[in-house]
Structure formats: C-alpha cells, structure tokens
Amino acid sequence: MGSVVSVLRELVEALEARTPVVSATVVDTSRSVPRRPGSKMLVFGDGTISGSIGGGEMEARVIAEALGALADRRTRRLSYTLLEPATGDPGVCGGEVELYLEPHMPPTTLFVIGLGHVGRAVVELAAWTGFEVVAWDDRPELATDLPDARQLMSDSFAEAIAAFAPDAFTHAVMVTRNAALDAELLPLLLSTPVASVGLMGSRRRWDTTRAALEAAGVPAEDIARVRTPVGLEIAAETPREIAVSILAEVVGLEHGA
C-alpha cells in the first residue's frame, strides 16, 4: 500500500514534475475501519493512485471526489459510515471515517514576452505577487539584470518555447514593441496549452495583428484565446501602473474571477 513517507516522497516528485495531484488523508475514525488516521493516498488526474485509504467502494468514491477537487482546485472533507451498503454506505466494517482531500497544483508561472519598461515592471511585480517568472526578449541587452525572473531567454522564440515548455499552469503576457512581432510570435505561443494569453496594445494594433494571424492560417479558435488589451481598466499610465492592471487580471483568472 505504500508508507506515508513513500507517498509524501511521490507527492514532492509529482510537484517537481509539474503534475497536479490530490492527497487524501484519513483524519479521524471510530470503531472498526480499514485504515487509521494518518493513512494517505495520492490521486492523479488520470485516476491512478498511490497508497491506499482502505480500498473497496469507499476508496472508489474518494477517487471520484479527488478528481473533482483537481477540477475545481478546492479542498474537501468527507465523512463515511461503513455499516449498511444496502442503504448506500460504502462498506460493512462497522465504523466511521473522515478524510481530508487537498489538491496540490504546480506553482503558476507567468511568461513575460517583451522586456521593455512595462515588461520589466511586470516581471518585478509578478515575482512579488508570488508567481514564478520566465521572461523573453529577442534583444539580449534587455534580457538581463532581472533577478526576479527564474529564467531569462533571448534566443529564438521557437527555441525559448522548446526550452521552457509552457503548460496549463502558465499565463503568458505579451508586451512587445510592435504588431509585426506579435504576429510572428503568437502562432508559436498559441500552439502551447498555456492557461491564458494576454496581449498589450490598442484596438487598432490588435486589428492589424489579427489580420496577419488570419492570413497565416491560424485557427479562429486559437485567435479567440488572446485577451487584449491585457489588464484591468484602471486608467493606468506608468509602466508600474500598467503592471498592476495586468497582474490584477492574471490573479483574477487564476482564481476564476
């Protein structure tokens, strides 16, 4: 069944691999039950498990609840009575058990594309907010001196995408210098499973970029993923004020607002 130590070790390994997982822990019991408080089980997104909290119908129900916790990223506290399967109980052991389900999600990364004044302000504020930050600019002289970024890149964007491999726990913010660069980079970015793509710029600039994407054959459903202009409307003017508006939007997306 796996010891608690081995289960916890596997939990750490999953998070290091950016794999979401739910830990199910027996927190309280009474009378006869299959496992005692402290017993743990991990449930992965494909329904596979590591460890056990008792097996049988109860464990099957816990797995289903855990998959729901992965979907909504919310903890759950479950109580089961193991007396009468005929009336819906998941067992006949004769006791009661309480479990705590906690989803563990990989740390969210903010991918900042463009390191001019606004991009640099976004990097600084994102790190302070608690995001891991990866940043890119095709100008090597700008992709430097940003201690708040976990990774700085200035090679080709295709190479940067391959090296970083943005995933569903990544929000991308594009604050580049012109529409031509946006149109060049967006097809590569939209081919990844990033959670959101925010683009800075005026409506006219987006019209130009969108036309270029359509002409290049980028699918309409990919183009529709772009949120522009990125950031909440707070009448921001300075780079740091604009960064505040951008981070406010990203935090809202992260929390389902």
Image (cartoon, rainbow, N blue to C red):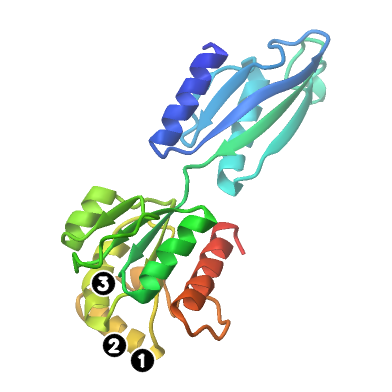
Q: Where is residue 160 in the image (x, y as percent from the top left)?
A: 22, 56
Q: Which quarter of the figure has residue 19?
A: top left
Q: Position of residue 7 (x, y in %)?
A: 51, 19
> Of helix, strand and loop, which one carries label 2?
helix
Q: Mark 1 points at which residue?
A: 204
Residue 238 horizontal side relative to residue 80, left or right: left
Q: What's the distance in space between the residues labelled 2 and 3, CA to CA?
A: 14 Å
Q: What residue type is labelled 2?
A: Thr
Q: Which amino acid does label 1 sit on?
A: Arg
First of labels 2, 3 by sequence position: 2
Q: Residues within 10 Å of mark 3 (few under 14, many from 20)?
A: some
Circle on res. 218:
3
Q: Which quarter of the figure has residue 248?
A: bottom right
Q: Vertical placement of 36 versus 72: above or below?
A: above
Q: Mark 2 points at which residue?
A: 208
> Of helix, strand and loop, which one carries label 1?
helix
Q: Position of residue 138 (x, y in %)?
A: 20, 67
Q: Residues within 10 Å of mark 2 (few under 14, many from 20)?
A: some
Q: Where is residue 226 in the image (x, y as percent from the top left)?
A: 40, 72
Residue 130 horizontal side relative to residue 256, left or right: left
